[in-house]
Image: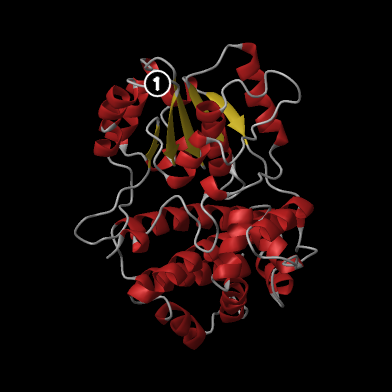
Amino acid sequence: MSDDALPEPDRIEGAPHPRETAKLFGQDRAIADFLETHASGRMHSGWLITGPRGVGKATLAWKIATFLLAAPAAGLFGDPTLDVDPDHPDARLIQSGAHPRLAVIKRPIDEKTKQLKSEITVDAVRRLKSFFQMSSADGGQRVVIVDAADELNRNAANAILKELEEPPAQTTILLIAHQPSRLLPTIRSRCRELRCQVLSDDMLGQALDQAGFPDQNSESLAVLAGGSAGDAIRLLHQDGLSLYADIVKAIEGLPRVDRLAVLRLADSCVGKAAQTRFGLTLDLLDLFLSRAARAGLLGAPAVQACPGEARLLARIAPDDRAARRWAQLQQDLSNRSRHGRAVNLDPAALILDMIFKIEETAQGVAAA
């Protein structure tokens, strides 16, 4: 397998890599917070970039890295900005992935399976020792990007913590976190947080246009993406809107599901070629449960993600008691899904188990 064919944990399939993204939309507040701190001369060595998945956290990290390595004085005079001339020598090195003073820590490839490991291992962090030694010869600023810090295993997290506690001179560590609550409290306490927000519909449309998906502004996409450009691109690239409609159609008879439709759905996720569909199916089931819990509290959604969804949600989540049941099921199945992926559980078996748990819960709600 060539290097170009290897999976990249820090790239959304169908989208440009964050380092290649020209403009960051909707995160002006986070940019301003960073530039204000930088201009004050009181720079933190550790930064925790948080927010929902797909809203631009990695893009922000790469722009900060480029700013620090290529133009550390930018923003001190005139209008503050992270923008750097793409023809700047350091910026070109960053774009090529060959900058000697930038290290990126991400999930490694398993050499046996040629697939991504499920977590960032301590070996990936330990390699920072040699990086710091080599880059110190330049005498310039050094940057480390951890994407994503949620994926650090315990030993790797402790190794990163040590670097945060005793940071090398002229070093900035940028940790991207989708779920910062999963990080060690001591890691969080050592970092300054930059919070990224979900995108407005207008900003989402602009981000999709930049990524090569113009005029994709349907209500269904906006509902399922939830202000995440990354999720929207994933849905468009993997035909996620149709997949969600198939899920709803298979369970629209709740408290009984269509057994044949459910079996077809599960079978469509089997095999190496269906790994992407398998992951998206699990995520869309999780999203459906979230929408069911929300419907129990706030009523059926005014805008539905597919035909028949609002009617189904109104029936299975009529009140706050049902909302609590669906919220608890979402938590339980989320843990089940995470464990199933980690141990390579049979995709069809995992999906069938989850849908039958949904059926069981709907029956409990109906009988209450």
Q: Within 10 Å of the Cα at label 1, are there few (<14), some (14-19), or many (20+) other Cα atoms?
A: many
Residue 363 image point, x, y percent: 56, 71
- The C terminus - image quarter: bottom right
Identified at 26% across, 31% down, the residue is: 126
Q: Quadrant of residue 131?
A: top left
Residue drawn 56% across the image and 80% down it: 250
Q: Residue at x 73, y 73 (%)?
A: 311
- Tell whether 89 sits left or right of 106: right
Q: Is residue 180 visible?
A: no
Most extreme residue toward the top is 41
Identified by mark 1, the residue type is Leu
**For residue 247, side relative to residue 29 (left or right):** left
Q: Is residue 63 left or right of residue 102?
A: right
Q: Quadrant of residue 268?
A: bottom left
Examine the rendered structure and indicate whether residue 20 appears above or below residue 333. Answer: above
Q: Quadrant of the N terminus?
A: bottom left
Q: Is residue 221 something one can see in this rendering?
A: yes
- Residue 219 locus on image (x, y percent): 76, 66
Q: Where does label 1 land, which residue?
A: 164
Above or below residue 83? Residue 364 is below
Relative to the observer, which residue lies in front, 320 or 201? 201
Task: Pick whichever, 352 or 271, lies toward us.
Answer: 271
Q: What kind of colouring is applied to the model shown? A: secondary structure
329 or 23: nearer the eye? 23
Q: Where is 316 relative to 308, above or below?
A: above
Secondary structure beneath label 1: helix
Q: How many circles with numbers are drawn on the protein?
A: 1
Image position, residue 230 (x, y; %): 58, 55
Q: Quadrant of residue 125?
A: top left
Residue 28: horizontal and vertical position, in percent? Answer: 72, 35
Which one is nearer the viewer's eye here, 138 or 289?
A: 138
Look at 51% across and 52% down and name the residue there. 17
